[in-house]
Image: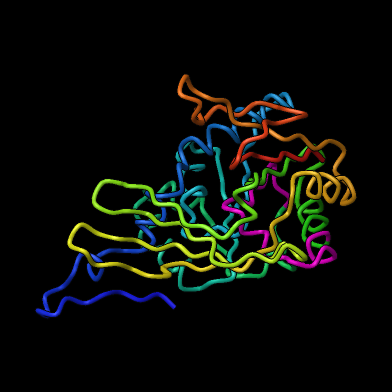
Amino acid sequence: MCARQVRKSGRPTMAEKADIHELYEQSVQNVENEIEFLTTTFRELTGREGYLFREDFCGTASAACEWVRQGPEYQAIGVDINPEVLDWGRQNRVGRLPPGDQARVSLIEANVLDVETPRVDLMAAFNFSYWIFAERAVMLQYLKRAYSALKDDGVLFMDLFGGPDSFDVTKEKTKHDGFTYIWEQAEFHPVTNFMRCHIHFKFPDGSKIKKAFSYEWRLYTAPEMRDLLLEAGFRNVTVYWEGEDEDGEGNGEFTPSETGTADLAWIAYIVAEK
């Protein structure tokens, strides 16, 4: 449960005044880069433009909103099972779009395992949310549903992380403007790859938001996901690996790779063509 610290003086702390969804997006999302990757990669793989996009586990629907900003022919569908975060997205993301753009975003409160939508050009399941399907059979069920929801040349985009550090119990702190983001891998079970993770936020006045977000996932490896996607019917599955800058840090540029790099921690895209 999310817990915010309160000052003894009774005055609101920075933690109390903060919006966890805004903090989350500032910490872990870059929807502009994500949409650019989706648009460019889809065009390279299919030879055409994709206009109808579905964002599964959409949360605040920031990616869906960024998608329709590309032009009046672009439409987006966001699917999430959490009504609270969808309401936040409607008010704070969709509601801030120009009226014409708002009309081209459809948010659906539903389980991605049984939702029915028009067939789309491309789909995305980002921020590792699909790892909630800990049973292999359920993951395969989801991937088959995704396959069916795509047009004949549709493309599914997912992200994943890995490396030795991902199999450990650890904390990582990242400073941002006005707050510190803390990623905690609180529990890991090597037999099942079950992991329990939390996101915390700390502020310059000493206040904190503990467990702003918590996740219970199965950490799927890249080979597992490739095999599952092929089993679900996709004809080609490619991992897009992030390049490095001169300091050896990720540069935000993702290209196809059959090997990857033996880093302690990495993030990649996995792209499945129908």
Residue 192 magenta-drawn? no
Horizontal placement of 247 versus 109: left or right?
left
- For this rendering, which residue is in front, 258 or 62? 258
Residue 94 vertical position relative to residue 1 in the rendered view, above or below:
above
Side of 136 where 76 appears, left or right: left
| Quadrant in which the C terminus is drawn | top right
Q: Residue at x 85, y 65 (%)?
A: 137
Q: Is residue 256 above or below residue 32?
A: above
Q: Is residue 219 left or right of residue 108?
A: right
Asked where in the image residue 154 lies, by quadrant, the reply is top right
Q: Is residue 240 above or below residue 265?
A: above
Residue 77, percent from left and from top: 59, 54
The residue located at (46%, 47%) in the rendering is 29
In the displayed image of the protein, which residue is found farthest to the top?
246
Q: Quadrant of residue 187?
A: bottom right
Asked if residue 123 lies in the magenta stretch, the reply is yes
Quadrant where the image shows the N terminus: bottom left
Could you say where residue 142 lies in the image, as x and y percent from the top left?
77, 60
Residue located at (14% from left, 80% from top) = 8
Residue 5 placement, left or right of 224: left
Q: Nearer the viewer, residue 119 or 103?
A: 119
Q: Which residues are magenta?
A: 119-140
What is the basis of the colouring in this image?
Answer: rainbow
Residue 260 placed where, x, y %?
Answer: 70, 31
Q: Residue at x 81, y 53 (%)?
A: 148
**How many numbered circles does the render carry?**
0
- The x, y position of residue 83, in whole percent, is 51, 73
Q: Nearer the viewer, residue 224 or 247?
A: 247
Image-quadrant location for residue 259: top right
